[in-house]
Amino acid sequence: MQVRSPQINLQHIISFYIVAHEESFSTASDKLCISEPAVHQQIRGLELHYGVKLFYVKRKRVHLTKAGEKLLVYAEEIFNQATMTENFLKSYRASILHIGIAGTLVPYLTGIIDKFKELYPTVQVTMREGPSAILVEELSSFRHDICLVGSLPTSDDGLRVLRIPEVERMVFVASPEHPLAGGTAVTWEDLTRYPLIIQHEGSCAREIVYRHFDSRCLKPLVGAEVDNIECAKGLARQKKGIALMFFPNVKEELVIGSLKIIPVVDGDIKLGIDVLMNREIDLSPMMKAFLDVVRAHFNQELSQISP
């Protein structure tokens, strides 16, 4: 069944309710934050549109007509429902924060989430982990308030971008028994001779490694595509290939010796972090509070890349 949209102006109904409730156009003007002539114009427009008289003035007092008395029942319900709707939307933004984090960055940024929860225990925080490209798409569809992804060249896609530049390095790692794990620096061309373990399409880490190979007119030999950090580390330990990893994510394995860094000539890869927000949404108090926690965590201001 096709739903027909009501043609009535709900703001006129709310203005009618305020005038009726206050029994005064001037008081209604103050409460509605519009001029008194504008209030008269709204009520007059409502009366003319439907051909009914809603108010009359007697001895400088505003009185309801019979039609006005009957309309007041509906207007009060509309006013109350509108008030409850507004309160819901305000409280929803004030009590829930939806955050998306690129899978590569989750272990590195967990401390920020924990600190925010400690400072704002009444706020419900939802966190979604996924590839950067998917998170950006979901942010554009208003499924997140804030997303944290690896830095990539920006595009005009309706996002506000704040950047934390080059927070950590990325390294190639492999089993200590891998032929390239002898400690001697290898070339990018050497890397093309062995299987590479990379993240699925849409991942920032994948884009970074492909850009480095492309800039040297080389093509990597992809041995496996993975969707999480632990899987990539597990395959590298099993001598299934070489993995490009965010250094903080493999510190433990490097200490115990289950993985080893493969040094690469001209292989200094730094990863920055982009804090993304949808430009169409004003920053809520909780979003601003979260950004303050991010700034404090990295002890630096965020560079504004896109307004």
Image: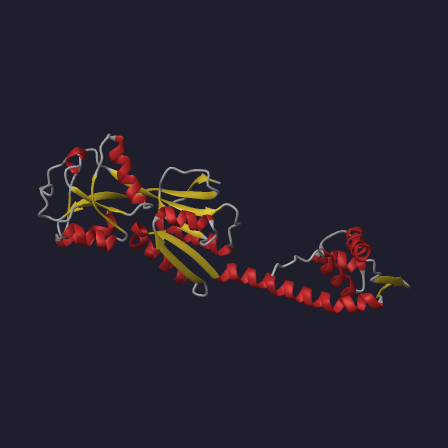
Q: Position of residue 58 (x, y in %)?
A: 90, 64
Specify whether 65 is left or right of 173: right
Q: Quadrant of the N terminus?
A: bottom right
Residue furthest to the front in view is 1
Note whether residue 299 is visible.
no
Closer to the camera in the image, 106 or 167: 106
The quarter of the displayed image where residue 18 is located: bottom right
Q: Eyeballing the image, is 122 above or below 144?
A: below
Please state if 102 lies on the left or on the right of 27 as rendered: left
User: Residue drawn at (73%, 52%), measured in percent from left and top?
Assistant: 34
Q: Quadrant of the rendered structure where residue 201 is?
A: top left
> How is the rendered protein coloured?
secondary structure
Q: Position of residue 46 (x, y in %)?
A: 78, 56
Residue 268 showing in the rendered view: yes
* Residue drawn at x 27%, y 38% as measured from the top left: 210
Q: Is residue 268 left or right of residue 256?
A: right
The residue at 64%/62% (across/down) is 82
The image shows residue 145 at horizontal and vertical percentages of 46, 53
- Give 7 or 188, whichever is nearer the viewer: 7
Which of 179/150 is in front?
179
How far from the left and from the top, in percent, is residue 286?
48, 56
Q: How many marks?
A: 0
**Above or below, 180 relative to 57:** above
Residue 143 relative to residue 81: left or right:
left
Name which residue lies at 24% across and 30% down. 217
Residue at the extreme right: 59
